Every structure is written in structure tokens, then in C-alpha cells.
Image: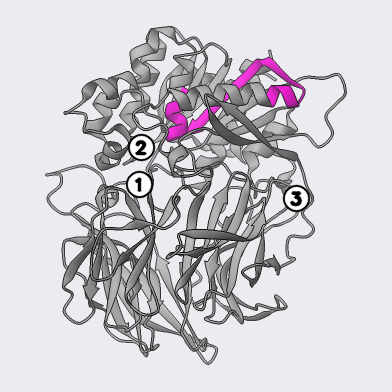
Amino acid sequence: MKVSKALAGAMTAGALVGTSLAAAAAATEVSTAASTATALRDYRSVAITAHGELIAAIESDAGAPGQRPHGRILVRDAASGKVTAEYDPCASCSYDFPSWSPDRRSLAFIAADAQAGTATLWVVRGGQPAAAATIQGVANTARWSPDGGRIAFLATVGAKKQTGAVEAGERLVGEIGVSEDAQRIAIVPGEGGEARMVSPAGTYVYEYDWTPDGKGFIATSAQGNGDNNWWVATLGHIDAASGALRIVAAPKMQVSLPHVSPDGRTVAFVGGLMSDFGSVGGDIFTVPLAGGEPVDVTPGFAGSFNGLAWKGTGLVASSLEGDQMTVVAVDPQARSTRRLFSRAVTANGSRDGRIVFSADGGAAVSVFETYEQAPYIAAGRVNELVKLTRDNDGASPQVAARSISWTNEGYRSQGWLVGPRQPQAGRTHPMVVIVHGGPASAATPRYVGAGDSANPLVRELVERGYYVFQPNPRGSYGQGLAFTSANRSDFGGGDWRDILAGVDAAIAQAPIDGARLGLMGHSYGGFMTMWGVTHSTRFKAAVAGAGIANWISYYGQNGIDQWMVPFFGATMYDDPAVYRKASPIESIKQAKTPTLVYVGERDVETPAVQSMEFWHGLRAMRVPTALVIYDGEGHAIRKPEHQLDQRRRTVEWFEKYLKQ
């Protein structure tokens, strides 16, 4: 298939800011199947009552291509899945993280009104939602006090941007760095009232939970810019009355999901080498609430923990182990684990982890999906999570997927190969390799639907005759803490060799044409794509999204320089050689592969100038290339019209260079 004239013109035009109306219109016609596809129900931010009787979730139905669906809060019986209540008090708002009161009679959640620039805490009592507090700014993560008398949440008053480094940054004009957003713990009476800011001003709180006595909080926090400092955040206790912050531990690792034991003595958390806030994976550590040195209570565990809850003096936790999502009982004293549940699915819970546990640790809920099975809520006892919802039962499998494992240089890696359900006999197919972001992350199954509502890029590539391979090389989650740390100071080294070995493993198992390979990725995957095309001619087409071309210049350009020190071992100023060694621009003269480059205009994590530097180098080497800079976007491309345009350009790029 030839590239359209509109796209060809865009490619020769060089760097673009935004997309034209014609391009947006063309993007909506990417798939003729979209209009006839089964409408999918989306579930997110699930919550479960203290003893597991009721479930709440934010649910939405897929809209038309280019439209963002509106979610609403649905309550379901945890045994039958029957909807018992529905709440949608603000039709123009998006909702966050429903939270049950300890007596299960009330439900709290936050509604964000982007146009008004406000966030409102809503409380449902007796089946009626009422606004309990409103702030000018952004907010998230409402949590009830243990006695149910108060509600805490994280608030950024007067926020200059949405929460998180992946969101579009504020425009850099005027004097820079003199005023930073501060996300603080706020408390509101259960019956509503004015929000009282509790945690210290100037301290950015990332995660928190009440202590069992209701007198304070355990929290991860850092001074200064919230986007930049999560990687150096400390674990602390915040007094609910005075707001005083006491450091509990300052481990040399990233910390997530802190919770205090029922007796109030011990803090458990997931710790390890993590590259993005919210992407959780590591071992489980404990430390006395009074303070001390954290202890790894799951040493040598062959997986990555991503959720946990106290169950008496023990813990119940979720983890990714290879291609399996598991539930594990953890004995902190014996430092032992026992698997309770395992399934080859992707689990999406909430900010409390991939699988969300009840307060007593006996029940759990999550949203499961695979490449072939549409999302559904799964719930039940922790050793038997069963399918609860059937809204998506009419969505049939569109692809065939298999888990592939391989060994390279002593490391066992795993990945996913997705292709047609009925390959044609005697035919070989091109393959696109998609490298995940992170690097501390993992490619896990996402349902591939018939229209544009579920994993549409993979769906369209397979429809057009491609296999899609998503590897999890060293540096990924799923094989243990040592595996996740194995590419430290070695970006583009062992991880790249693992990917190449995985490509060979995929070719050995499916009718793939090894002479027609494509490479793509976003963020770390964008960097690996830039690295790949400057270190190999094996790939005949590439798409690099939000990548890093030059770690030396990147260090001084990005808004999150703290993340690099744990991965490179030193700052760029102290050890420039390790940064230069990993820079694709250093090998730009070896590039031969036609490469499409895209990035968000206001990307805090990987600024657009990095993509521009790589594009400039490819043009100087006379390598076919194009650069698209999406207007107003951050690290995550959010606007539906831009998502459609990016997918259209990606597919047409591969069609042009892999189908010749």
C-alpha cells in the first residue's frame, strides 16, 4: 500500500506542530470496522468494601473514534455482579478512585472539572451524592479515616498542570523554577466542610495511607518539584493534628504502596528500581513505624510485586511472575512466600495496586484482560478471583497470542507474540517489534478489539498482515529485582541483545519474514528504537516516539533529571562517559533505517528537542525521516485526534517500507 499524498507531503515538509483538519479527518477513517465493532465497557479504579461485599468502579462505554468517553461510578454486588447503584453527579467531570467508608455505608470520590479548574470531593450517603468540599486546582486519592469520621485526599491548590510527569508541562516563560506545585494531604469532615491542608507546605506527597489509630499518615514525599523528585522521595509519618513530618526511612531505592500494620508498629512497602511513578515493581520491604533500616522480606523472589495489603501479622500481595499475574501470601517474619492464585492476564486495579485487596486481606478485586479476552471485573476470595461482569462477552477474539520465553547471556526473558488467528499456509509475514516504556515496566496483554476502542494499533497491524512482538528484556518487571536492575548503566547493551534474541525466538515459532522487520516504541521504547536504528540494519522501518537521542544534552533539558541517577549510577556531571556511551546520536552515521519520529510539544520527561536532534541527524545522513510534534501534548499523547493521527502515520510508515 502506498503512502497517501497527504502523508507524503507531511513527510517532506519536515517538522510539524499539531495536525491539520484534513489529517484529523483522515485519521477518523483509519478503520472501517470501527462503526460495526461491539461497543466495549471500560472499567478502572476498582474499590472493594472492608469485608468484600460490594465493589465500586469507574465504568464507561466506548465512544466514537476521536471522542473521549465519560465515566460514571457504578456499585456492584461482589457475589453476583449485579449493579446496585450508579452515580454521575457531574456530566462534564472525570472521576478518580472511589473509596468505601469502613462501615461500607458511604462512598467518596473526586470529580475533576478541567474547564472550571476545580476538583470536588463527593460523598454518597443513603444513595445520594453530595459535594463535601471543592478546591481550585487538582486532587486525587480520597481515603476515609479508620473511624469513618474524616476523609483525606491529595490536593494541589492553584495547580499549574495536571498531576504527574507524563502530563503536559506548564509553558516555560518568565523566570523558571521559582514557584512549584505542591501536592499536600488535605482533611475534610465526613459530613463535608472546608478542606484543611495538613502536610507541610513545600513538601510534595506522592502516596499516603492513614495509620490505624487515625492520628496520622504514612507517606512518600519529597521537597521541591513533584515531577522531578519521586525518585528520591523518603518514607515519612505525618501527624494529622500538627502536620509535623518525621522521616521513617530514606532508602536508596524507589518506594511505593506504603501501608501500616494493624498493630501500628510496622510499615510495609514495595521497593526497588522503578523508572516511573505509578509503574510499580520490586520486592516487599518492612520497616518499624518508629524508624529504622528497611528489610527485604521477599529476597530472591522471581517476580515483581505490584500490590499489597496487611492480613493480620502477614501480608497478601500481587505480583507479575513471567507471564502470570499472581496473588501471594507473604510471611514477613519467616521471609517466605506462598502462591495463592495465578493467571496469564493483565490486572488493572487502582492506585492501591494491580489487584486491590479488602481491608481484612481476605477478598480482592481487579480488572482482567488478555489479548483475546475483553476486560472484565474479577473478584472473590484472594485464592479464587472469578469473572464478575459480562458486559463484554460479545467481544470476540480478533488475534491469536502466545507467550514466548528465551534465554540470552544467562538471563531468561519473556515476551508476547500476537498475530492472525488463522495464518495463511505458505505465507510469511512482516513483524513489528514494540518495545515498552520504562525501562522498569513490562509488556502485558491488552485486549485487541474489532474497532478503535481496544488496542487499535495492534489490531490494525495484524489486520494488515503483520505479527507484533512485545519483548520484556532485562530491565523489565516480571523476573525479580536482580533482572530489573540488570541494565543499570547499560542502556542499549544487554537489553538490546535480549530483544534481538527474542526476535530470533519469535521467528522460530511463527511464519515471520526476518527480512521485513519493523521497530517502534515510546519513551524508553523510543530511545531503544533510536538506539536500534543506529546499531543495526536488521530493521527496515522504525517509529520512535518521545525518545532520547543524546543523554548529555537531555540531562540539562528534561524536567525529571533525578530519575537517571539510580539507572546510570551518577549524575551526568560526575560521569559523562556512561551517558555518552548510551547516546544514539553518537552513532548516527550508522543509521540507514527509515524512521518516523513523534513527540508531544510540552513533554516534561523527554523534551521535543531530543526528537528534533535525532530527526536532524537522520536528515543529515540522508535517511528517510519525518518528525511530528503534537500541539499541547505532554509525554502521554492524550487528545483523541492526536492518538488517531499518530496511529495512522505509524501504520502507513510501516506499510510503505515493509510492504515493498
What range is drawn magenta here?
Answer: 506-529
Q: Residues within 10 Å of mark 1 (few under 14, many from 20)?
A: many
Report whether 255 appears left or right of 496.
left
Of residues 72 and 583, which is closer to you in this image?
583
Q: Are marks 1 and 2 in contact (CB under 8 Å)?
A: yes
Q: Which mark is residue 450?
A: none
Label of residue 601 in the image = 2
Identify the residue at image location x=50%, y=59%.
Answer: 336
**Mark 2 to mark 3 CA distance (whole Å):** 33 Å
- How busy is the neighbourhood of tag 3: few (under 14 within 10 Å), some, or many (20 plus)? some
Q: Quadrant of the C terminus?
A: top right
Q: Crowding near pointer 2: few (<14 within 10 Å), some, many (20+)?
A: many
Q: Position of residue 274 (x, y in %)?
A: 38, 46
Name the foreground residue: 643 vs 260: 260
Q: Is residue 227 depicted above or below 31 in this figure?
A: below
Q: Taking the image as drawn, is residue 359 in sight?
A: yes
Q: Amino acid at mark 2?
A: Glu
At horizontal 37% and vertical 88% (from top left) the residue drawn is 190
Residue 22 visible in the snapshot: no
Residue at the extreme right: 425
Q: Tell me where residue 598 sits by quadrant.
A: top left
Identity, as a three-letter code, of the amino acid under mark 1: Ala
User: Does residue 446 appear to the left or right of 46 in the view shown?
Assistant: right
In the drawing, does residue 648 fall left or right of residue 111? right
Residue identifier under label 3: 37
* Residue 576 x/y as whole percent: 22, 23
Give the Cα distance between marks 1 and 2: 8 Å
Q: Which residue is mark 1?
A: 168
